[in-house]
């Protein structure tokens, strides 16, 4: 009698159904994430991302990479981890951006970078290379503008400038520092003759 009990398909279906319900209840679902007390559904995740954006009319090439991209359909929010961006344009210096985290909301018109943000304008061998370091930066790619209200350090040649707040226009090369600006020049002191 026990042998005939295990041969019935209804018994196996019941066991399979109970196992499925138990697994569904006890396993964590990877398609949702707890964020600020609210639960958002993740649309998709891409890891080890590399991409190129080319504008043939303006001859602009932008290369980007990220360790991880997570997209949330509610609010069209994209979050990236450990990002890198390189922008190459004719008659303009090379622009490189790195950050620990980035968030794009509602498309790519506004990019918010956080965690060890670095912008390098110019190539490493250029004497006019400008390096900017901060913990938060708002990028507006279509207008080549970068701005922050956080502490920044700007280095050019042997000069180091610290400030709170910055506005940078990559099209014009203009950099405006907002407050608490201090400058330091590390050049070798000249000897008196």
Image (cartoon, helix red, strand yellow):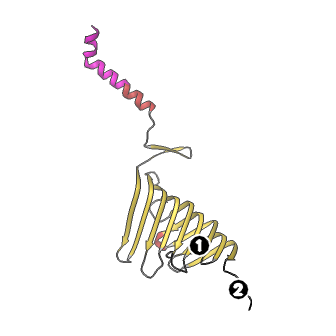
The answer to whether residue 76 shows anywhere in this view is no
Residue underneath mark 2: 190
Residue 20: image quadrant is: top left
Query: Residue 115, image x and y in percent?
Result: 57, 58
Number of residues whose C-alpha sits closer than 10 Å to that of mark 2, classed few (under 14), some (14–19) or many (20 or more): few
Question: Which of labels 1 and 2 is toward the front?
Answer: 2
Taking the magenta stretch, the answer to whether it contains residue 8 is yes
Q: Residue at x 44, y 52 (%)?
A: 70
Describe the element under mark 1 as helix, strand or loop. Answer: strand
Sequence-first tag of 1 and 2: 1
Q: Residue at x 52, y 80 (%)?
A: 172
In the rendered structure, the answer to whether residue 124 lies left or right of residue 45 reads: right
Given residues 101 and 156, the one toward you in this image is 156
- Magenta: predominant secondary structure element? helix
The magenta-colored residue range is 1-18
Residue 164: image quadrant is: bottom right
Query: Residue 98, image x and y in percent?
Result: 51, 64
Q: Are marks 1 and 2 in contact (CB under 8 Å)?
A: no
Query: Residue 137, image x and y in percent?
Result: 56, 65
Residue underneath mark 1: 167
């Amino acid at each position: 009698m026990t042998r005939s009990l295990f041969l019935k398909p209804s018994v196996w279906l019941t066991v399979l159904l109970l196992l499925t319900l138990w697994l569904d209840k006890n396993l964590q679902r990877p398609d949702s994430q707890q964020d600020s007390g609210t639960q958002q559904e993740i649309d998709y995740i891409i890891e080890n991302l590399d991409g190129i954006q080319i504008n043939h009319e303006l001859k602009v090439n932008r290369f980007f990479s990220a360790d991880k991209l997570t997209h949330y359909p509610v609010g069209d929010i994209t979050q990236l981890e450990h990002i890198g961006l390189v922008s190459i344009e004719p008659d303009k210096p090379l622009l490189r951006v790195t950050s620990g985290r980035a968030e794009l909301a509602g498309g790519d018109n506004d990019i918010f970078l956080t965690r060890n943000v670095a912008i390098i304008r110019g190539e490493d061998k250029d004497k006019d290379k400008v390096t900017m370091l901060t913990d938060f930066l708002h990028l507006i790619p279509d207008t080549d503008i970068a701005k922050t209200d956080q502490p920044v350090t700007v280095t050019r040649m042997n000069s180091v400038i610290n400030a709170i707040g910055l506005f940078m226009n990559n099209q014009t090369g203009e950099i405006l520092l907002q407050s608490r600006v201090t400058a330091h020049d590390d050049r070798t002191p000249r000897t008196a003759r």
